[in-house]
Image (spheres, helix red, strand yellow):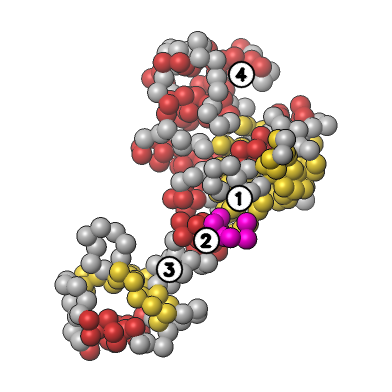
């Protein structure tokens, strides 16, 4: 089976700076891959090489079996790309820009109008079609960029920070749109918003210093968190010292920490690897007749895993 996206050892340097250091991965139809990494990690440079906007110093990238350098035109026919900042012609209206994109994609007449109308409806741009792009808010400029990437209904989407500048309602809409398209396409999104990984990604890749440091499902990355399967406990009153001390002595407990949100009187009971704390914790609470307002098992915290991976002294 041909992977829709196949990356083999691509590398890129800018002078003495090694932005991307020989990374390899594939993305198949139905996958939404989230690129995570600190600023300067190499995410945007990698996406530009996949999209054919930068030529790799080494390695190769293919879109639907077409090399983005040696067979770039065919690769781009199958690709929708939203670059960082969503550049467009600022003096054009949103509508005229999308018509222009339809024409350079080879569409004419009724088909061009239908393509533009479908893209406009998908990203809810109807209210600003006659406004010059330079007058639009950052969020609407981003949506114009997303519309041009979707206009030809490509098999592969490369989206660099697709929800940057959007308000919460707009972010929800764009995430729902990405999820609705996922089954038919291979999608890569770059994001700094960890909740976006949970919302739309089937897979997450952490990049730092131009190298892939982790690659797995969001659940697999969450399982690396020290809060994975921890119990969050909040009583009607602060937990008595005697109860806290007894909980800390349970065989499966690694430690107890106060909640880190302002005004939260709850605690996190951290498990040793593989321990199921629920039965023992419940027995202690029942024996001491502690009134509980909230009791839940944590999935894990991607933000902590991200920090642990990207701030390792070995990098």
4 relative to 157 in the view: left or right: right
Q: Which residue is mark 4?
A: 102
Task: Work out whether mark 2 precedes mark 4 in sequence or the reverse, and give the earlier one.
Answer: 4
Mark 4–mark 1 Cα distance, whole angstroms, equals 37 Å
For residue 305, above or below residue 23 = below
Which residue corresponds to the image point at 38% horizontal and 78% vertical from the top-left? 255
Q: Which mark is residue 227?
A: 3
What x and y, as percent, mark residue 220? 55, 64
SS at mark 3?
Answer: loop
Instruction: State yes or no: discs 3 and 2 in contact (Cβ < 8 Å).
Output: no
Task: Work out whether mark 3 precedes mark 2 in sequence or the reverse, and give the earlier one.
Answer: 3
Task: Work out whether mark 2 precedes mark 1 in sequence or the reverse, and give the earlier one.
Answer: 1
Mark 2–mark 1 Cα distance, whole angstroms, equals 12 Å
Instruction: State yes or no: discs 3 and 4 in contact (Cβ < 8 Å).
Output: no
Mark 4, mark 1: which one is toward the viewer?
Answer: 1
Q: Which residues are magenta?
A: 310-315
Instruction: State yes or no: discs 4 and 1 in contact (Cβ < 8 Å).
Output: no
Q: Which mark is residue 308?
A: 2
Mark 3–mark 4 Cα distance, whole angstroms, equals 49 Å
What x and y, as percent, mark residue 118? 52, 26
Mainly helix, strand or loop, the magenta region? loop
SS at mark 2?
Answer: helix
- Would you call the spot at circle 2 few (<14 residues within 10 Å), some (14-19), or many (20 or more)? few
Mark 2–mark 4 Cα distance, whole angstroms, equals 45 Å
Quadrant location, the C terminus: bottom right
Which residue corresponds to the image point at 56% horizontal and 48% vertical from the top-left? 37
- Would you call the spot at circle 3 few (<14 residues within 10 Å), some (14-19), or many (20 or more)? many
Mark 3, mark 4: which one is toward the viewer?
Answer: 3
């Amino acid at each position: 089976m041909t992977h829709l996206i196949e990356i083999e050892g691509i590398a890129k340097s800018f002078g003495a700076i090694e932005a991307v250091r020989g990374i390899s991965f594939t993305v198949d139809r139905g996958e939404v891959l989230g690129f995570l990494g600190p600023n300067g990690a190499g995410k945007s440079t990698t996406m530009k090489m996949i999209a054919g906007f930068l030529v790799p110093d080494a390695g190769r990238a293919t879109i639907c079996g077409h090399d983005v350098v040696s067979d770039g035109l065919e690769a781009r026919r199958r690709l929708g790309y939203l670059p960082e900042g969503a550049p467009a012609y600022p003096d054009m209206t949103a509508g005229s820009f999308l018509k222009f994109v339809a024409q350079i994609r080879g569409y004419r007449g009724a088909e061009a109008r239908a393509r533009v109308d479908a893209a406009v409806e998908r990203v809810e741009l109807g209210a600003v079609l006659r406004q010059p792009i330079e007058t639009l808010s950052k969020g609407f400029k981003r949506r114009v960029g997303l519309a041009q990437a979707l206009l030809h209904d490509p098999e592969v989407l490369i989206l660099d920070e697709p929800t940057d500048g959007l308000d919460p309602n707009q972010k929800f809409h764009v995430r729902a749109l990405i999820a609705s398209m996922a089954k038919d396409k291979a999608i890569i999104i770059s994001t700094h918003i960890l909740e976006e990984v949970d919302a739309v990604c089937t897979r997450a890749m952490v990049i730092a210093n131009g190298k892939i440091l982790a690659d797995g499902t969001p659940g697999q990355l969450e399982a690396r968190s020290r809060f994975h399967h921890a119990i969050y406990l909040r009583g009607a009153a602060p937990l008595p010292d005697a109860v806290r001390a007894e909980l800390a002595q349970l065989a499966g407990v690694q430690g107890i920490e106060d909640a880190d949100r302002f005004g939260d009187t709850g605690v996190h009971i951290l498990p040793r690897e593989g321990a199921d704390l629920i039965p023992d914790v419940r027995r202690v609470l029942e024996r001491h007749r502690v009134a509980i307002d909230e009791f839940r098992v944590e999935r894990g915290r991607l933000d902590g895993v991200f920090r642990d991976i990207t701030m390792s002294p070995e990098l």
